[in-house]
Amino acid sequence: MQNVYKKPMKEILIANIAIFAGFFVQTTVGFAASLIAIPLLLFLFGFQDTIAYLSIFLLGFSLIMGPKSWKSVNKKAFLSMAITSVIGLFVGIQLLKIIQPQFLEKILGVFTLTYIIYHYFKKKRIKSIAKHEKLFGFLGGLSSGLINNGGIIFLIHLNSRFHLASHVRGTIIALLGISNILRIPLLIQNELLSMEIFAKTIWALPGFLLALLLGSLFYKKIDEAKLKQLMLILLAIMGLVLIFK
């Protein structure tokens, strides 16, 4: 961390770019801030500190965007998946203390690409995925706790259930909101979030607020079909990145 303190402006610039890029996309489609921001934030922090740093912004995102997107949430799916996602989050935070989950990222990447390929060629929903909402709630929470990427799991499940991309987006934001709210006290309890990391979030606040503003404006200009297509394209990119990074 010594080099970071010698060049604070460089750290501030990287943090703002990472947070802006990640949350512009997340505001638009409802997920993916972690996958975009984490590779850049790793230039500044270790893996555990990166997860803690990003978690603070994810909490802010949920507190601001959650109420705004609530009207598009599918309440039945949300309630069904919420409880198991909390259990998964708790397990994931505990595992974060003892493992480096890069191998799990690659498994998630392979699963994601397999889903995209099947969806592209078959052009239909996968009933086995749509049925197991509690399992995918747990897996999404687990992924949120370990690598802050629960949105991938939630999207795969919800895309197999709903036609409207706005319902998928709103429900993902609501589900991730649970993880984002609970993750902070869990990180503190497990001594994974320090005051030093918390203090540094002020550096990237301008990038975060700008991302929410521009992302919201961009979302309003996209129709349902284009939003769904953007979600699946982004999902495919995320799968590739998880495998090869």
Image (cartoon, rainbow, N blue to C red):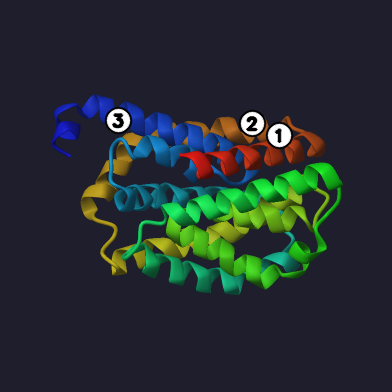
Residue corresponding to mark 1: 220
Q: CA gap, disc 3 to disc 1?
A: 30 Å
Q: Position of residue 218 (x, y in %)?
A: 65, 30
Q: Is mark 2 on a helix, strand or loop?
A: helix
Q: What element carries label 1?
A: helix
In the image, residue 87 above or below residue 159: below
Depth check: give the residue in front, 221 or 19: 19
Q: CA gap, disc 1 to disc 2?
A: 5 Å
In the image, residue 117 above or below residue 89: above
Numbered label attached to residue 217: 2
Q: Where is residue 32 in the image (x, y as percent from the top left)?
A: 55, 44
Q: Is mark 3 on a helix, strand or loop?
A: helix
Q: Which residue type does callout 3 highlight?
A: Ile
Please report whichever mark, 3 or 2, sits nearer to the chain's N-terminal start. 3
Q: Which residue is drawn at 41% across and 42% down?
A: 38
Numbered label attached to residue 191: none
Question: Which of the 4 image quarters holds residue 70?
Answer: bottom right
Q: Which residue type does callout 2 highlight?
A: Leu
Please report whichever mark, 3 or 1, sits nearer to the chain's N-terminal start. 3
Viewed as shown, does residue 7 lie left or right of 82? left
Q: Which residue is drawn at 69% across and 41% down?
A: 231
Q: Which residue is drawn at 75% across and 37% down?
A: 229
Discs 3/2, front: 3
Q: Residue at x 38, y 61 (%)?
A: 184
Q: CA gap, disc 3 to disc 2?
A: 25 Å
